[in-house]
Amino acid sequence: MRIGVVTFPGSLDDRDALRAVRIAGGTPVSLWHGDEDIKGVDAVVLPGGFSYGDYLRCGAIARFAPVMSEIIRLAGPPTQTSPGLPVLGICNGFQVLCESHLLPGALIRNEQQQFICRDQKLRIERTDTVWTNRYGKDDEIVVPLKNGEGGFAADQATLDMLEGEGRVVARYLDVNPNGSFRDIAGISNATGTVVGLMPHPEHATEAGYGPEAQAANSTGDGTDGLAFFTSALQGVLSA
Ligand SMILES: NC(=O)CC[C@H](N)C(=O)O
């Protein structure tokens, strides 16, 4: 199972995402922002960081990188022959997915007007996605969060649609760290192939390096984020 990770100018977490894919048992493939194709990968991770220096808005320029044309085309609505390319956007990657209109809504500046960095408790609410099928419904996990424009915002109709269709993948627990509407930490497209998540599961995939257990379903060894990547191996296989 080959999972591509895109490096944009200013990407920061591409190496950890590649490493997470490998730890999960997949084959990591480096993709470059200027690539015209995605080398036949089975799924793509858009990593965290500061693509193009966060100029204009976070993710607004990365959305127009050559490699994104192909990703947007392949990840679009499912056809009779393809369920759509699975894409996980983490933090800056989530911002790129919203800017690309693969996911609705937008990420806006944290309400505290400050960059936030903390270990964050989440509840996994949607498990029938390519990226979360190895979690249990309502599992509580802890992974790192670090961003300046992390507040998920959308109009009431869009928020109601996301809730009504069960497309809220993860919600902040205990603390809403950035003013996200309805405590939303992550959402999916209708079919569960495209997922955007503000916190960073790729930084919690290796024993001893992730946050210590603080939630009901924490693994206890700092690997609460690993199931996003093992899920993809499972999800792509059964898609
Ligand atoms: N960790 C990240 O991906 C940060 C995303 C973006 N640069 C922000 O500050 O919101």
Image (spheres, rainbow, N blue to C red):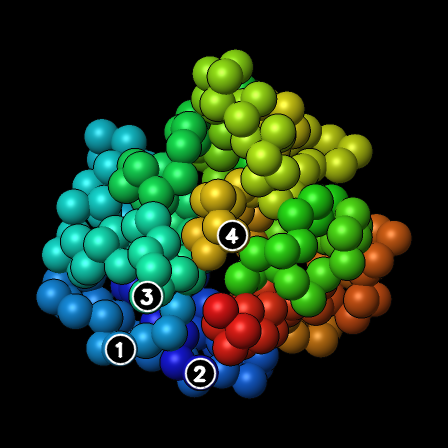
Rate crowding at label 4 as few (under 14), some (14 to 19) or many (20 or more) other CA atoms within 10 Å. Answer: many
Q: Of discs 4 and 1, which sits in the foreground? A: 4
N-term mark: 4 or 3? 3
Q: Nearer the viewer, residue 27 or 9?
A: 27
Residue holding disc 2:
1
| Lower position in the chain sequence, tag 4 or tag 1 | 1
- What percent of the width, then of the height, locates residue 12? 38, 58
SS at badge 4: loop
SS under mark 2: loop
Q: Indicate which label's residue lies in the foreground, 4 or 3.
A: 3
Label 1: few (<14), some (14–19) or many (≥20) C-alpha neighbours in 10 Å: few
Gap in Å between the C-alphas at discs 4 and 3?
17 Å
Q: Nearer the viewer, mark 2 or mark 4?
A: 4
Of labels 1 and 2, earlier in sequence is: 2
Q: Which structural element holds mark 1?
A: loop
Task: Kindly identify the amino acid type of the residue bearing the numbered disc 2.
Answer: Met
Asked if disc 4 and disc 1 are in contact, CB closer than 8 Å, the reply is: no
Mark 2 close to ligand 1, CB under 8 Å: no
Picture disc at residue 192: 4
Q: Is residue 182 left or right of residue 218?
A: left
List the single residue furthest toward the top: 156
Q: 10 Å neighbourhood of mark 2: few (<14), some, or many (≥20)? A: some
- Amino acid type at circle 1 is Gly
Q: Mark 3 or mark 2, which is nearer to you?
A: 3
